[in-house]
Image (cartoon, rainbow, N blue to C red):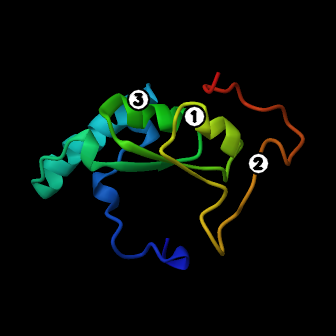
Amino acid sequence: MAAFGLGTGLDLRIGAYGGDAVERTELPRHALARTRRVLGLSLVGADLVIVGDTCRDVQATQAVGARAVGVATGDTTAVELRAPRADVVLSDLGPGWPSGTRSRRSAGLPDCPSACG
C-alpha cells in the first residue's frame, strides 16, 4: 500500500471484505457497522464513496445510497461500469497503477459473467 501512497490515511479496520458477506451489496453495511464499532462514528451510506472495478461494486454502493467511483483496471470496461450508473468512471488510478483491462482477458480466458446487464 505504501508503494502507491496509501500507507497513511487508509484504515483497513473499517473496511468490508469478500469474506464478510455472500452478497456484495451487503458489504457497505458491514463497513458502516465496523466504523461505528471501531471509531465510534455513525455514518450513513450518503457519507460513503466506494471505489470498485466491477458492476457489482457499483451496485453495492447503490444498496446504501453511497457514491460510486468505477475504475476500469479489471475485467470490466469503463463502458460497462457506466451501465449501473457509477457516479464517476476512471480509466485507471493514475501514474504507477495498471490501466485498462487485465487478468482473464489478457490471459486469453473467457470473461467472467457480468452483473452489468
Please name the residue that numbered disc 1 is placed on: 55
In percent of the image, x 85 and y 36: which residue is there?
Answer: 109
Marks 2 and 1, how far apart at CA: 17 Å
Task: Report the residue marked by disc 2.
Answer: 103
Dot 3: few (<14), some (14–19), or many (≥20) neighbours within 10 Å?
A: some
Relative placement, left or right, of 87 versus 112 is: left
Q: Amino acid at mark 2?
A: Ser
Q: Provide the secondary structure element on which disc 3 rests.
A: helix
Q: Is residue 7 above or below residue 13?
A: below
Name the N-terminal-most of marks 2 and 1: 1
Q: Nearer the viewer, residue 113 or 62?
A: 62
Q: Callout 2: few (<14), some (14-19), or many (20+) C-alpha neighbours within 10 Å?
A: few
Q: Nearer the viewer, residue 23 or 61?
A: 61
Q: Is 99 positioned to the left or the right of 47 in the image?
A: right
Q: Amino acid at mark 1?
A: Cys
In screen coordinates, is 21 left or right of 37? Answer: right
